[in-house]
Image (tube, grey):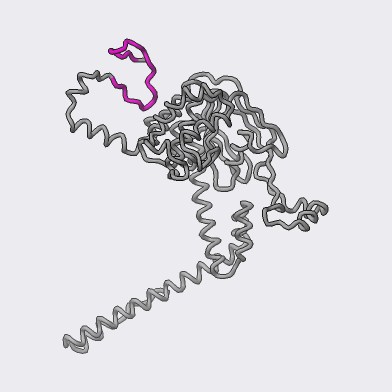
Amino acid sequence: MTEDKGSKASRLILPGEIEETVDSRTDERMDQGALAAIAAAENEAPDPSEFGLKVDAPLGEVAIRAENLGIRYNLNFTKKTKLRTTFANLLDPRRRNAGHFWALRGVDFTVRRGEAVGIVGPNGSGKSTMLLALAGILQPSEGVVEVSGHVSTLLSLNAGFDSELTGRENIALAGALMGIDQRVMREITPGVIRFANIGAFIDAPMKTYSSGMRARVGFAIATSVDPDILLLDEVLQTGDNKFKNKSRKRIAEVLQTAKAVVMVTHDMSWITAFCNRAILMDKGKIVADGDPEEIADMHEQDAEKRAKQKRKAKQLLKHGKVDLVDVRKARRTGTLDKLVEGHEEDYEELKAEKQAKLKEARKERKAQRQAKKAAEAAKTGGGAQAVDSAVRTPKSST
């Protein structure tokens, strides 16, 4: 706790926040060079460690509980599905079950007040589906989800926004959709506008906004309504460094009031800086739950492994060893590793052929260089001995 000499009031300094105790007279004496340096510092990429918030206070009551949570998508029914096919799928049990895909299955976890939980994993692992279930947007196909308290979500840059309305009007709309009293929304709207800091665009239609501007408004709304639980899904990757800096401080403020935060991101710096717990997901299941640093390391190792599998699948596809349909299905169902393992011999053959071609190409280039040297030696009149020396090839290694 520090004391402001001007107001004599105590306040809590947030992690990474620089305490400002300079009074107005000092501000007047500050030269332009110092002001320019501060402005430049605000736009520098923030160091995640500056905003690290490892909650030391005892955790509170359970805010979120999921038990045997499962979300199943029906792949048989799409916008292009014909009516006849739809009835056939409904009547035939084999068809009805063949088109199902479990995005989540058998998920059990709890989140307590005061926890900041980061969810990581490869694309298609069920991270976003998990947040949609926690937000009540998706109903469980099996199991239960219990949420205690007011939930504020920022799951998409376009979620809840009407592109034809202005930013100011969309703030009011968002409040109505969250069930917040109009009087309360009128009180917090000026703060939302100041935090978003998009200038005159706040009164322009949202269809004129960039993705970063949408993110600013959405994040400002989600974190200004005093949520008990804040859900964030990959929306903090947009915007400039200055806004990201402000976003980190705002999340720290939310956590200081002992609220729960669940965030999905591919940026491990957010996980290690803010979260006191992390979850690694894969193929719709929780595969690890624990310390953010350890989970981040596991995720990065897994990402390297998956990148290697993708490179192998690309080579197999390029040389006709696998079908494009099989590769797409494997990516969609998270079984690319099994597909690649089943063609390991084919991949090794392709690898050996590539190495043999590279070796032959190196020999050819060496022969060309030696021939060029011999031609140059002949032009300079170095004699038969010089030509013989230029074209003599070293013993080849076998």
- Identify the residue shown where x is 71% and y is 56%: 81
130 and 33: which is toward the camera: 33
- x and y, in percent, of residue 282 in the image: 59, 44
- x and y, in percent, of residue 116 in the image: 51, 29
- Identify the residue shown where x is 31% and y is 34%: 42
Q: Answer whether residue 13 is magenta in the image.
A: yes
Give the main secondary structure, helix, strand or loop, of the magenta stretch.
loop
Vertical side of 360 occupied by 196: above or below: above
- x and y, in percent, of residue 270 in the image: 45, 36
Q: How many numbered discs, if any?
A: 0
Side (left or right) of 139 relative to 27: right
Side (left or right) of 61 relative to 88: left
Side (left or right) of 26 relative to 237: left
137 and 395: which is toward the camera: 137
Residue 329, picture quadrant: bottom right
**The N terminus is located in which quarter?**
top left
- Identify the residue shown where x is 22% and y is 23%: 27
268 and 71: which is toward the camera: 71
Vertical side of 258 occupied by 141: above or below: below
- Identify the residue shown where x is 31% and y is 22%: 19
**The C terminus is located in which quarter?**
bottom left
Q: Answer whether residue 1 is magenta in the image.
A: no
Per the rendered image, the range of residues in magenta is 2-20
Vertical side of 284 occupied by 178: above or below: above
Vertical side of 394 occupied by 92: above or below: above
- x and y, in percent, of residue 37 in the image: 23, 34
